[in-house]
Amino acid sequence: MAIEQVIGIDLGTTNSAVCVWQKGQAVLVPNKWGEVLTPSVVGLDEQANLIIGRPARERLQSHHALTQASFKRYMGTEVSLALGSRQFRAEELSALLLRQLKEDAESWLGQKLTQAVITVPAYFNDVQRRAVKNAARLAGLDAIRLLNEPTAASLAFGLLENREQKYLTFDLGGGTFDVSVIDMFEGVVEVRASSGDIRLGGDDFSQAIVQWMLSQHPELKSAQAGLAAALLAKAESMKQMLSHATEAKASLEWAGRQWSWTFTEAQLAECSQPLLMRLQRPVQQALHDARFSLQDLDHILLVGGATRMPLVRQTVARLFGRFPRHDLNPDEAVALGAGIQAGMVMADAAVEDIILTDVMPFSLGIEVVKRHGNQIEPGFFLPLIERNTFLPVSKTETLNTVSDNQTCVLLKIYQGEGRRVQDNVFLGEMSIDVPPRPAGELTVDVRFTYTLDGLLEVECRYDGSPVIARLVIEKVPGQMSEEQIAASLQKLADIKQHPRDRQENRELLARCSRLYERLLGDERAWMDRLTTAFEQALEGQDLRRIASSREDAEHFLQQYKEGLLP
Ligand code: AMP
């Protein structure tokens, strides 16, 4: 039986990319525009047709109420994002984007795709990871493996220079910052430790520039949302200009008036200072947890679009006392890693010998009480699995009941490093019924299992209970229920795609172009006429015209297939 093609997807905050493992190498898959990066932007046009990628990004300013970008930041939350009058969760917008990536890849590969390796920030928690899996499901894809983004980039680099080495991957994307320390030896790519900040990325630098722009023209502060999008676009463009020049200019026309700014490297350095400071701690923590010193590292590898900023590169050089490497295109490294992992999942011979090990970047545990004499104080965190433990991992902790005749044990699950649970992220809770006994006489075994995907399973058993109860974590804030997923599937199916983007129409156009390439003379000219008529009908969105020009084109293709034409 043929092995099913698995695709690797970098679902980025700013851009997304697809990569497949083919003929012994990772190949980036172009979208329908022939580009390997698809902006992670989703919108609707005035007729409520879906627009995704570059055309949606082009409408961010002009149609801000109908367009959404950077929604990855809200994965696994209840935040509602509007496209006109319709409301979406981040999972749903991600699903629309994933569906497009899947269809583009299907057209390019000429086969149906159902399975994907999807990358996630290493610091994504359990809820956010499940949100990515749900988004894939809504898009008709099974996310068979979630891969940490810096691990993906490290894998791509490891294969580029397949030798014994230790390196640190510094990944600053649009919305997240991840650091991984890698030890590579004898075909093993071992992630020794990961750390990061899920609220720090290139977009924060753009926001800092917006604040500076407003400080120059405070009268703009009270302006409406449309202006905020325009200001952000100007800030983004000045930020990118300063990656190549020492000064950047921007001007903006709004409500009949014009505003302008001249922004310098020094000003960027000043307003970025608080953000640059935040780069330090995750680096130190990852090195500490890996038990590596700066001298142990052979290289520092830069990944993520925001590492194009000279200021970020200087900060990295200062932190490490040497210049970082940027061998891999920062926009493509994560997708390449996802493609390699897809090859590994398919057990391709070329990557069969590579072993990838990863770690859990944060500690997981439960809330426990502390007893001071007769007093009980709740709210303490008991880590069951400590951060940077190798995956997969399974650990059991034995606990005692705290009250006489207690009939239920409530487990509150948290992620983080704080001593008190209030300083950590609440992941969910579950309870099991227990037989009444005097306090402390009943013991409960709690087993945490953390999978390679970074997902948590919890099992619980009290002494004497006949079976181990595997409990699903309930009441998880931000997690979609089965009913919500079913409703979303219906909702997404109802969104109209532009006829030009519908799979059957795109396939027909592809067949027309293929035949055009083979034909010559009058037949070629005829094929061109039929294709143009079909394209124009699609642009016009007149369903009757689309149907008739479709039929004409199909008739011609059919005749050719049946050998009726020479
Ligand atoms: P990624 O999520 O890896 O695609 O990174 C996107 C981030 O990189 C965004 O915040 C962009 O503003 C930023 N970025 C991309 N190109 C540049 C550039 N030439 N200079 C500065 N920042 C950039």
Image: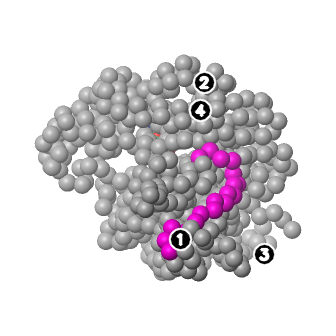
User: Is label 4 within 8 A of ligand 1 (CB to nearest ligand atom)?
Assistant: no
- What secondary structure is marked by label 4? helix
Residue type, label 1: Ala
Which residues are drawn in magenta? 387-404
Name the one closer to the observer, 307 or 319: 319
The 10 Å Cα crowd at callout 4, few under 14, some 14 to 19, many 20 or more, is: many
Of the two numbered discs 4 and 3 in the rendering, the one whose residue sits closer to the viewer:
4
Q: Which residue bears the numbered disc 4?
A: 287
Measured as percent of width and height from the top left, residue 346 is found at 78, 57
Of the two numbered discs 2 and 3 in the rendering, the one whose residue sits closer to the viewer:
2
The 10 Å Cα crowd at callout 1, few under 14, some 14 to 19, many 20 or more, is: some
Q: Earlier in the sequence, mark 4 or mark 1?
A: 4
Q: Earlier in the sequence, mark 4 or mark 3?
A: 4
- What secondary structure is marked by label 3? loop
In the displayed structure, would residue 378 be above or below residue 351?
below
Q: Which residue bears the numbered disc 2?
A: 294
